[in-house]
Amino acid sequence: MADVVIDLPRVQTRPAPAAPAPILHIEGVHKRFAANGGEIEALRAVDLSIARVEFICLIGASGCGKSTLLRMAAGFETPSAGQVRMNGDPVTGPGPDRGMVFQDYGLFPWLTVRRNIGFGPAARGVPRAEVEAIAERFITMIGLGRFADAYPHQLSGGMKQRVAIARVLANDAAVLMMDEPFGALDAMTRERLQTELLTLWEATGLTVLFVTHAIEEAILLADRVIVMSPGPGRITADVPVALPRPRDVVSASFNEMRRELAGLLHHD
């Protein structure tokens, strides 16, 4: 009997889908500042890609260039060499797609909570009724309804920081950049705001680039922890944090990661 040949349909093989383009891409960035008739090299050959909705923490010793890198990503500083791109386009200055939150809050002292939050949309020419609706939405989101018409000097530090975050969100930013935003707060307020920030991040789909000097804070918040070395600042490690959220700061896995990052920070 002749062999029976079964003609199976050909399996069409498809190439694996390409990874999505990063929302923020830092490539070959150097930064030098003039000082005392010479130059100080703050950053050297920094490469970093950040995907949409990632939460990235930068850690390193004081003077390692964390804040300088953040300011370049925000458009407040220009690289001496290399390039920063947002959605593929070169960053040439600040823009509403990138919102910055500083340790000192940066609120306008002459404006109420409501008007601070609505400032960005109003400046862009959004109709007044829509600005008011946007402000009200974020006032509710940060739980400051009773303080909507208060001025910054009437708020606690934690409240001011909530308003600063809400102001960025109201401006429809895609990337939230934070420079040690909780560093001046007491421990209890800091813990509460860390939890609230994660809740806002999960609810809004923001991408977050967060500078901190605290290893525990970085592990608690981040998807990836970027370790920078001083003199001049370079990225020496990119450490994914695979711990499930909410994270337990007293767990063995949390403390194992804390020891790993401490070792990386102190390694020359």
Image: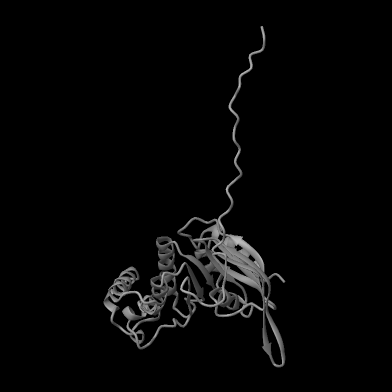
Q: Quadrant of residue 86?
A: bottom right
Q: Quadrant of residue 192?
A: bottom left
Q: In the drawing, does residue 93 fall left or right of residue 3?
A: left
Query: How many circles with numbers are drawn on the protein?
Result: 0
Its colouring scheme is one colour
Query: In this picture, is 64 found above or below 36?
Result: above
Q: In the drawing, does residue 175 fall left or right of residue 78?
A: left
Camera-nearest residue between 135 and 227: 135
Q: Quadrant of the N terminus?
A: top right
- Residue with the most extreme bottom position: 36
Camera-nearest residue between 99 and 42: 99
Residue 174: x %, y % from top left:
47, 67
Q: Quadrant of residue 4?
A: top right
Query: In this picture, is 210 found above or below 53?
Result: below
| Residue at the image point whose x is 41% and y is 70% from the top | 169
Residue 169 in view here: yes
Residue 258 in view here: no
Camera-nearest residue between 63 and 115: 115
Residue 220: x %, y % from top left:
50, 64
Residue 106: x %, y % from top left:
44, 83
Query: In this picture, is 58 found above or below 147?
Result: above
Camera-nearest residue between 106 and 174: 174
| Residue at the image point whose x is 63% and y is 71% from the top | 83
Residue 150: x %, y % from top left:
30, 83
Q: Quadrant of the C terminus?
A: bottom right
